[in-house]
Image: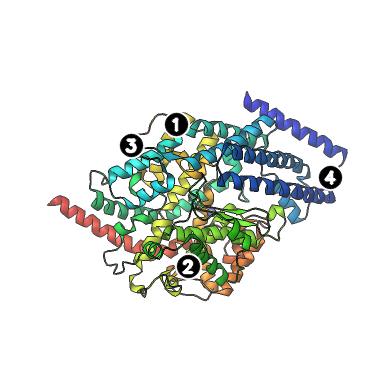
Amino acid sequence: MQAATLRVLVAAAAMSLAGWAQAAKPTVADAEKFVKDAEARLEKLAIDAGRAEWVAENFITDDTEVITAQAGERYLTLSGELALKARQFNGLKLPEATARKLKLLQLSLMFSNAEDRADYTRLLAKLTGAYGKGKYCPKDGNACMPLGELEKILAESRDPARLKEVWLGWHNQAASYKDDYVKYTALSNKGAREMGFADTGAFWRSNYDMPPAQFASEMERIWQQVKPLYDALHTYTRYKLRETYGPQVVPASGPIPAHLFGNMWSQSWENLYPLLKPAVAQSSYDLSKVLESRKTSAVDMTKYAERFYTSLGMETLPKSFWERSLLTKPRDREVVCHASAWDIDGDMDVRIKMCITPTAEEFSVIHHELGHIYYDLGYRKQSFLFKNGANDGFHEAIGDTVALSITPDYLQKIGLMTETPDPAQDIGPLLQRALAKVAFLPFAYTVDSWRWQVYGGQVKPADYDKAWWALREKYQGMMRPEPISANGFDAGAKFHVASDTPYARYFLAHMLQFQFHRALCREAGYTGPLHRCSIYDNKKAGAKFQAMLQMGASKPWPEALKAVTGEDRIDGGALLEYFAPLKAWLDTQNQQLAAADKARNKS
Ligand code: X8Z
Ligand code: ZN
């Protein structure tokens, strides 16, 4: 019934456009004028919406939620209207840039019903706020804990009961906004279908300069390529977790309980490093300890990152960045603490919002965030529709590429490491990096595999958790610490689900950053193993990178990739090359651990 109504609406819109086309066939000049006007109007509303959103996420209140929803609605009204109008130029032979802009304009949701549109933006603002305010309130009456505190316990505690309590506490709170999410996704699908997409998942998969089905198979191809490395890491981690927690907690085979990986979503296992580090590792070096003991401030953390970018020849951050960014968690109000980078005016008003703590993990995250900022600054001379990443995976990959250059040698150079790194002992740092990067891959794949099923209608709300855990078991080899609860919403305990931010971008970014790293190291004349390369202070590599940043979204992404790497597809080869020494080491360890296990079982 609903779908039929929608088909009628879309057909009606197409007919009126066809009628218009008959009346006066649009010309190239019409198209160019249309695009120019569209960009000017969209830019203005985008700036308004950005400011409203900034305030809403920095001060979560009922009023700021309404204000941001309204600004979002105004933007969506215009972008939907322009997306439909842009269709009149389809098929017209146009200059490349104009044709590309018209294509980008059509990547929008479209609501012919104003009430639906208002509900859609209202629910999105509400969901983002609900996640930001989320807390676990223990039944014993102890103080409620925000996510940051829960994450710290997961990172540091080795008490499985405490880990489980905290894990469940956070996951269970997400059920409170499940109903809103269900309503929201239904509306989103409605908007996607009105624009001619099969559903919102298909709309998301249409953002990569290739047909949506091809994008899905590319993701699967890459996952299969990197899976053997993940499997080796998972096997090794199981042995070590069994040594720590015992066979009652960690089974010898099958999925491992998800609360034991040192992270709320088990997406990074970096915090397990002390349990997993090679026995031979002579170094007890710990960047978190150094940062904490020196009481490194949030501003200092950010300055370290800025210095990396300026060492590549990039500009210093504008004064307003330091004045307007939020770098520490305020004590007196609710904010969305999930780290983010903001390009407020398409020019120099760039900011980050992050509740920085002095840990090694956050040291990487701050480099990640500044990657977004330097991309924003790099493409600021482009016109509005091209002020974006070549695709969203590129945006996520810039800062991570830079952070791959945070090597022991680099840390020593900037005075954050006092020992002299021993290259014969570098399996330790490489394992540490794999715990962040390789462990992440199946999680990243899971998040949008789940959402594609939700948006595609294959998974109904009653089965959200069933489907979520089927995927987490299949890809990550993990299970829920307790059976799923009726009407639970574990996926909603992840920021990007609650705030409806697509996630495939991070999967792509984890391939791209190794491709960029390899290419930039070559550009710098480096010929050794990839994991020891740092492009710090190399202006030649920096210039190559910056040239790509400046392109923004003006060209299809394979061209941007080619400009830096010479490759034209996203691929796991560079990641595998980077971790090759670790893969060999893991295989040996796993063989030895299996043999020891066997011997123990016999005796
Ligand atoms: O959300 C982020 C960034 C902001 S774009 C901090 N990341 C993903 C996550 O935290 O889940 C970075 C890696 C994955
Ligand atoms: Zn990011």
Closer to the chain start, of discs 3 and 2, is 2
- The Cα atoms of the two marked residues, 2 and 1, are separated by 42 Å
Residue density around tag 3, few if under 14, some if 14–19, many if 20 or more, within 10 Å: few
Q: Which residue is mark 4?
A: 26
Residue density around tag 2, few if under 14, some if 14–19, many if 20 or more, within 10 Å: many
Closer to the chain start, of discs 3 and 4, is 4
- The Cα atoms of the two marked residues, 3 and 1, are separated by 16 Å
- Looking at the image, is mark 2 or mark 1 nearer the viewer? 2
Q: Residue at x 27, y 67 (%)?
A: 280
**Where 430 sits versus 55, above or below?**
below
- The Cα atoms of the two marked residues, 2 and 4, are separated by 51 Å
Kindly check if marks 2 and 4 are in contact, taking CB atoms under 8 A apart as contact: no
Q: Which residue is mark 2?
A: 405
Residue 386: x percent and y percent?
Answer: 69, 55
- Looking at the image, is mark 3 or mark 1 nearer the viewer? 3
- Looking at the image, is mark 2 or mark 4 nearer the viewer? 2
